[in-house]
Image (cartoon, rainbow, N blue to C red):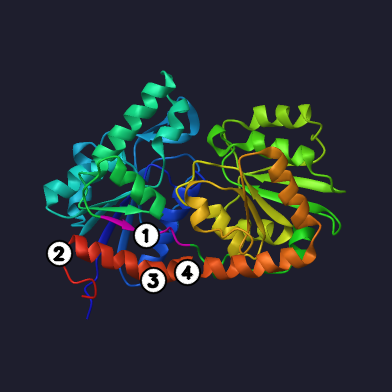
């Protein structure tokens, strides 16, 4: 009989902060617990946190000066360190190379337990959050995150693109490609008419949807440029998320004559997201900084046709013309692809079926045993023990 593992997930991003890492960590927790393993999440203390139904240890933290939604975990004090050591974790799994990631590594080394690190983010693409010259910050972010990865017993990459990138950056520790999974029970096709009614959308609206943070690295101004070129009656773009650029994006939408076409719906809890995917006609995504593109997968799992910029991890999950449309980073070309989908019901149906089929292998329940096997290999055990 396979032994039960005690696993610590150390993350700087967790609910109520919304985003891909928060969702990924909670999905991992749920699926590992379903397999009979014991999981504790170590995350920053945040106002409004509701940890009911989860085992979460909150670490004292302070708001980040350049990103108020982000909480900076403070160094672990002796009392909290003793508490974490008393858990006798079998695996320390970090989801960031700084703050609580560094704490996970230190605790793993002192306990003689394996240290696993998931490389979720292209850290150099976030250099604009540091008030220093961007080229210098980007260069140091690459070197620093790669150096951190090279101290792990196992590095998990959410896409082959990330795995290749790590090798070119000099990471020689074991690297395995293991995508972030999607809950296919939650994200699946459903009643679009009911979803529209619940979201106050009309039956004849042509609805484009974006789900994600409203931040500079998501390339949302290109999305606005594209939507401004789309010729379709009753067109609406729903932006579901929050971030530092919301005020600027509102101004940008107004300057393009889109004030009555673009709706800022705010952040949404994961349980509420499927209704948005079911209500829309197409999912639009212009980011070029993704390691995988979790929201794209959620849309595909719900049978929603995707138009996305061809970049990084997204092109590993979307096959152009089969499960979505991939376009260059060009507003006119993006707009033409959107018009093609809106004007061709047969194409929408084809992409919906193709997207749903392509999302199938990314089901989180199927990927969870692979993660457990990775943990066991890091511990020097047979993966099936």
Q: Is residue 11 left or right of residue 217?
A: left
Precedes in sequence: disc 3 or disc 2: 3
Q: Which residue is mark 4?
A: 361
Extreme residue in the bottom direction: 1
Alpha carbon distance from label 3 to label 2: 23 Å
Q: Nearer the viewer, mark 3 or mark 2?
A: 2
Q: Which residue is mark 3?
A: 34
Image coords of residue 185 (percent x, y): 55, 70
Q: Nearer the viewer, mark 4 or mark 3?
A: 4
Badge 4 element: helix
Badge 1 element: loop
Alpha carbon distance from label 2 to label 4: 27 Å
Badge 2 element: loop
Precedes in sequence: disc 4 or disc 1: 1
Q: Quadrant of the N terminus?
A: bottom left
Q: Nearer the viewer, mark 2 or mark 1?
A: 1
Alpha carbon distance from label 2 to label 1: 19 Å
Q: Is residue 121 magenta?
A: no
Q: Which residue is mark 2?
A: 380
Disc 3 vs disc 1: Cβ atoms closer than 8 Å? no
Alpha carbon distance from label 3 to label 1: 19 Å
Precedes in sequence: disc 4 or disc 3: 3
Q: Nearer the viewer, residue 328 or 130?
A: 328
Give the residue displayed 41% in from the left and 23% down from the top.
135
**Classed neighbour count for the residue bearing mark 1: other residues with Cα under 10 Å, few (<14), some (14–19), many (≥20):** many
Disc 4 vs disc 1: Cβ atoms closer than 8 Å? no
Please say if 319 is above or below 213: below
């Amino acid at each position: 009989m396979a032994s039960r593992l005690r696993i610590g997930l150390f993350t700087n991003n967790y609910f109520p902060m919304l985003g891909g890492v928060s969702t990924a960590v909670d999905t991992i927790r749920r699926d590992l617990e379903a397999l009979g393993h014991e999981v504790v999440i170590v995350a920053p203390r945040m106002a409004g946190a509701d940890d009911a139904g989860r085992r979460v240890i909150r670490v004292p933290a302070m708001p980040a000066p350049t990103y108020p939604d982000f909480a900076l975990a403070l160094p672990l004090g002796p009392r909290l360190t003793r508490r974490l050591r008393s858990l006798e974790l079998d695996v320390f799994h970090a989801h960031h190379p700084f703050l609580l990631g560094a704490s996970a590594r230190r605790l793993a080394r002192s306990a003689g337990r394996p240290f696993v690190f998931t490389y979720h983010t292209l850290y150099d693409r976030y250099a604009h959050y540091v008030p220093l010259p961007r080229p210098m910050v980007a260069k140091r972010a690459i070197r620093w995150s790669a150096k951190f990865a090279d101290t792990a017993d196992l590095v998990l990459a959410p896409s082959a693109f990330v795995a290749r990138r790590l090798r070119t950056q000099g990471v020689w520790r074991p690297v395995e490609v293991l995508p972030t999974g999607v809950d296919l029970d939650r994200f699946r096709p459903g009643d679009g008419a009911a979803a529209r009614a619940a979201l106050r959308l009309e039956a004849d609206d042509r609805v484009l949807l974006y789900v994600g943070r409203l931040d500079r690295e998501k390339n949302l101004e290109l999305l606005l440029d594209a939507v401004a070129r789309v010729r379709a009656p009753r067109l609406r773009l729903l932006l579901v998320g929050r971030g530092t650029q919301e005020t600027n994006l509102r101004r940008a939408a107004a300057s393009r004559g889109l004030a009555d076409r673009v709706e800022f719906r705010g952040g949404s809890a994961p349980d509420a997201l499927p209704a948005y995917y079911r209500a829309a006609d197409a999912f639009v995504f212009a980011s070029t900084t993704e390691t995988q593109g979790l929201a794209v997968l959620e849309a595909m799992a719900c049978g929603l046709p995707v138009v996305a910029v061809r970049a990084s991890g997204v092109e590993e999950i979307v096959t152009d013309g089969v499960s979505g449309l991939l376009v260059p980073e060009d507003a006119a070309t993006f707009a033409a692809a959107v018009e093609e989908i809106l004007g061709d019901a047969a194409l929408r149906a084809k992409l919906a079926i193709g997207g749903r089929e392509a999302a199938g292998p990314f089901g989180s329940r199927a990927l969870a045993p692979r993660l457990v096997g990775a943990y066991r290999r890091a511990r020097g055990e047979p993966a099936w023990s």
